[in-house]
Amino acid sequence: MGIRRGHQAGGRISARLARPRLARPRLLLLAPLLAAVALAGNAPPVFSYAVDSAASTVSAKVGFLGLGSKTAGFPDVSGTVRLTPDRPDRIDLDVTLDARALTAPDKVTLGRLRGEKFFWVERYPTVRFAGDRLALTTDRKGTIEGELTARGVTRPVSLAVTFDKPPMTAGRGEAITLTGTTTIDRRKFGMTAYSLVVGRQVNITLKARIVPD
């Protein structure tokens, strides 16, 4: 009996001594979480904005008959913008146009632009610009490098931009107005029709009001 009691007591003591060792795996599991929290605390701030559709528009102007021009409008604009003040070269700009809402100065032009020889809106209902690199030349002007997708074709595009206030120092609660311009060759997007009547170069202007998201 004495031997058994000795064994039982020894077993209880051994179990007590072994219990604290279980805490080590738990601490090891917590270590990555604590490290992630520390890194998140040191992450640079990011300002997020949404495009104010009611106060934003895009226009596309093209030469016509070598004498004048015609302008199409895209009144339905949506998108987001993300800026990192600590990294002024970094931007996440994503703007989408509803090509089905396209406007034109007359019914004939409107029908052609919405048709398959140009934007083919039934098959490609949106036009999208995605920019990921910003090169500021002043505190309010610069260039956004990205890609334009129209009629199912994606091409690199440089957008010259002007902000109504310095975007990297504007407060979190302030709206910003962005104006961007670029010129594209419509043929590179599969719009090759009426080459003797309609110019190749299309001048695009984006006017967007972005509000804190």
Image (tube, helix red, strand yellow):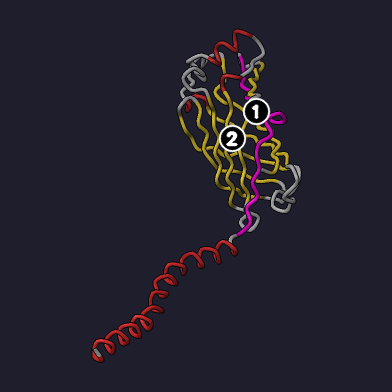
Residue 183 falls left or right of residue 177? left
Residue behind mark 2: 95
What secondary structure predominates along the stretch shown in magenta?
strand
- Residue that extends furthest to the top in the rendered view of this protein: 108
Q: Amino acid at mark 1?
A: Val
Q: Against 40, is 148 above or below?
A: above
Q: Are marks 2 and 1 in contact (CB under 8 Å)?
A: yes
- Residue that extends furthest to the bottom in the rendered view of this protein: 2
Q: Quadrant of the N terminus?
A: bottom left
The numbered disc on residue 58 is 1
- Residue that extends furthest to the front in the rendered view of this protein: 1
Q: Against 208, is 170 above or below?
A: below
The total number of labels drawn is 2
Q: Nearer the viewer, residue 36 or 205?
A: 36
Q: Is residue 49 magenta?
A: yes
Q: Amino acid at mark 2?
A: Val
